Amino acid sequence: MLVPRRGLLASTPLLATERLEAEAARVLPRGVADWIAGGAGGEAALARNRAALEAATLTPRVLTGAGPADLRRRIGGIDLPHPIGIAPFGLHGLMHPDAEAATARGAGSALFIVPMVATLPLEAVAAAAPGAPRWMQIYLQADRGATRDLAARAKAAGHGALVVTLSAPVAAWRERDIANRFAPDPARGNGNDRPAYARPLQGGTDPAPTWRDIEALQREGMPIMLKGILHPDDAARAAGMGCGVIVSNHGGRQMESNPASFAALPRVAAAVRGRVPLLMDGGIRRGEDVVKALAAGADAVLVGRPAAWALASGGAEGVRDLLARLAAELSTAMRLLGVERLSAIDRRLLD
Ligand SMILES: Cc1cc2nc3c(=O)[nH]c(=O)nc-3n(C[C@H](O)[C@H](O)[C@H](O)COP(=O)(O)O)c2cc1C
């Protein structure tokens, strides 16, 4: 499926993710491009995310009578056109002048998880695509009042859930950023700061949160997804509290010794037992990767870097095209596998 497009990449068809990365590297300063692409330490976890997905194979069934794929998915009470969302990544203003508003417009009716460390305030991101499915990502703040205020603001702006990221209580060792002396302009990441907060949100993260902090946050009355879970016992505890689970090693950006998200997924899915929404991110680059994650137990997947590259190279249109391409690839893969509905994607395809 080719979608006509305007702008920077005029006359190019929907770009494969590697091409998007190359386009982004062409338009971005080196430090920003490396910040997006890089991972922690020697980047083994970054590579592992891809290697695990690439090692998995999908075995088709024939003569199933499967017709055109139905990609619709209901998750956490919202109806989505397909199970592919945009992961929260910070500082969209480093990638495009319209920042998170461009991403929101490009995401349209797909799930977009709005980052806390953002160029634009969460209210402006909500206003850029009114009524679209949005969840708000936060880091628990050492200033509990700031955390509660962020939750209240997200609720008032219509964001449907809070995504609490647990994989980054401290800054990681990212060797590319250290070599580049990369320090993002704080003005690109203070869109959600308020004078009432004790500390700026960047740097104000609680370095030692506990499950009790999650219980306290539940009292704010919003659905909560816990992002950055890799261990099945943590997943079981989250599900037992009614919190959704996002299996994620933060795109290999925190510890190079983390397992691949895809490798951690089956045990987490077994612990969650369908009680709460289960998402996965890390290394999703093509529609067939989406099938693999769903077959291993995820209800939906998120893309991080591909969306950042699409935003940098093509703005809102770039993001829209990325999601359209991934959805079209997913649809093709389902036809070729002999499945019509997402609910028919299960572990047997991975055998
Ligand atoms: C440039 C960049 C910034 C990120 N910032 C955040 C963030 O602020 N909060 C968060 O929860 N995750 C953040 N992440 C992690 C993503 O949400 C996601 O887990 C990861 O990118 C998924 O892997 P992928 O890039 O291979 O798709 C960031 C990722 C990137 C690439």
Image (cartoon, rainbow, N blue to C red):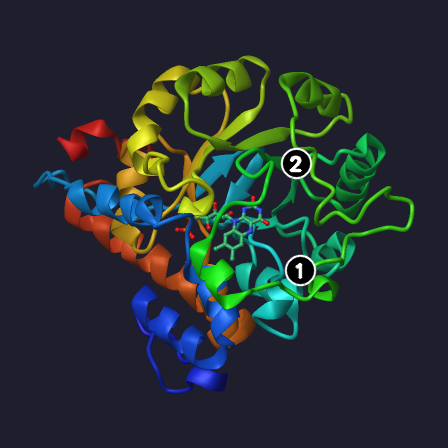
As shown in the figure, which amino acid type bears the numbered disc 1?
Answer: Ala
Q: Which mark is residue 162?
A: 2
Secondary structure of the residue carrying tag 1 is loop
Q: Which residue is the site of mark 1?
A: 129
The residue that appears at 74% across and 44% down in the rendered structure is 158
The residue that appears at 50% across and 60% down in the rendered structure is 177
As shown in the figure, which amino acid type bears the numbered disc 2?
Answer: Leu
x then y, percent, for residue 92? 61, 63
Secondary structure of the residue carrying tag 2 is strand
Q: CA distance from mark 2 to mark 1?
A: 18 Å
Q: Which mark is residue 287?
A: none
Tell me the crowding category of disc 2: few under 14, some 14 to 19, or many 20 or more residues within 10 angstroms, Cα based. Answer: many
Q: Is tag 2's residue or tag 1's residue first in the polypeptide sequence?
A: 1
In this view, the residue in front, 274 or 303, is: 303
> Quick check: 144 left or right of 42?
right
The residue that appears at 44% across and 60% down in the rendered structure is 176
Q: Looking at the image, is mark 2 or mark 1 nearer the viewer?
A: 2
x then y, percent, for residue 283? 34, 49
